[in-house]
Image: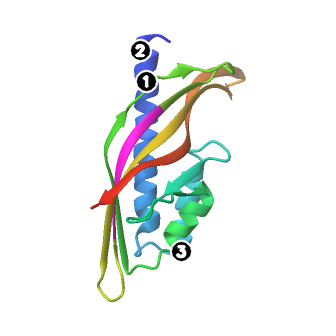
């Protein structure tokens, strides 16, 4: 893949991860209306390959639970906290894109997620989770003015938890 094309794809991948970060914050925000949260969930789902899963961890528990993306986002919207704040930071590529036999390219982006939830009685839960996001880059086509135009698109795949610690 030529360096200029790879740079454009890297930029698109990071942009989609930033979009997901904004969507997750909006969905988790207790000030977001139910209808707005549902609209944002639908937008977030457009970022993913079919059947992608999100890993969820809790401090003090070794078990990591995985949910389909829609289920994860719906659960996030219904968390039993008075307020929720979710920030993603230190977003970076950790692997180069590798070409797959089907012609797609696959890579991994690592992010850190800071979660803060405050219960009705004022208890505060905080954690920082390191997550690895699989990204898929594939060639697609669209019709513009009767001509078929090819382009590269980036979709997000599974989001795996690699570490959770106190926030």
In this figure, which residue is indicated by the disc labeled 3? 34
- Please tell me which residue is depicted at 46% across the width and 17% down the height of the picture: 5
Badge 1 element: helix
State the separation of the CA atoms marked 3 and 2. Answer: 42 Å
Mark 2 or mark 3, which is nearer the start of the sequence? 2
Seen in the image, is 12 located left or right of residue 41? left
Which image quarter is the C terminus in? bottom left
Is 131 a magenta residue?
no
Does 158 appear above or below 150?
below
Residue 4's label in the rendered image is: 2
Q: Position of residue 40 (x, y in %)?
A: 52, 60
- Please tell me which residue is depicted at 45% across the width and 42% down the height of the picture: 132
* Residue 144 seen in render: no
User: Over which residues does the magenta segment extend?
Assistant: 108-116
Check if mark 2's residue and mark 1's residue have beta carbons within 8 Å. Answer: yes
- Magenta region, main secondary structure: strand
Does 56 appear above or below 93?
below
Q: Position of residue 151 (x, y in %)?
A: 59, 23
**Alpha-carbon neighbours of circle 1 within 10 Å: few (<14), some, or many (≥20)?**
few
């Amino acid at each position: 893949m030529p360096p200029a094309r790879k740079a454009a794809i890297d930029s698109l991948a990071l942009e989609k991860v930033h979009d997901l970060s904004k969507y997750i914050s909006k969905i988790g925000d207790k000030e977001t209306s139910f209808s707005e949260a549902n609209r944002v969930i639908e937008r977030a789902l457009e970022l993913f390959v079919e059947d992608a899963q999100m890993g969820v961890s809790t401090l003090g528990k070794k078990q990591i639970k995985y949910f389909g993306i829609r289920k994860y986002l719906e659960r996030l919207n219904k968390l039993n906290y008075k307020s929720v704040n979710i920030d993603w930071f230190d977003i970076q590529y950790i692997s180069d894109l590798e070409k797959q036999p089907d012609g797609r390219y696959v890579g991994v982006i690592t992010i850190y997620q800071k979660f803060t939830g405050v219960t009705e009685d004022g208890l505060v839960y905080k954690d920082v989770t390191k997550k690895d996001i699989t990204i898929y880059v594939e060639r697609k086509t669209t019709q513009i003015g009767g001509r078929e135009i090819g382009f590269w698109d980036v979709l997000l795949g599974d989001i795996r938890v690699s570490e959770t610690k106190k926030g």
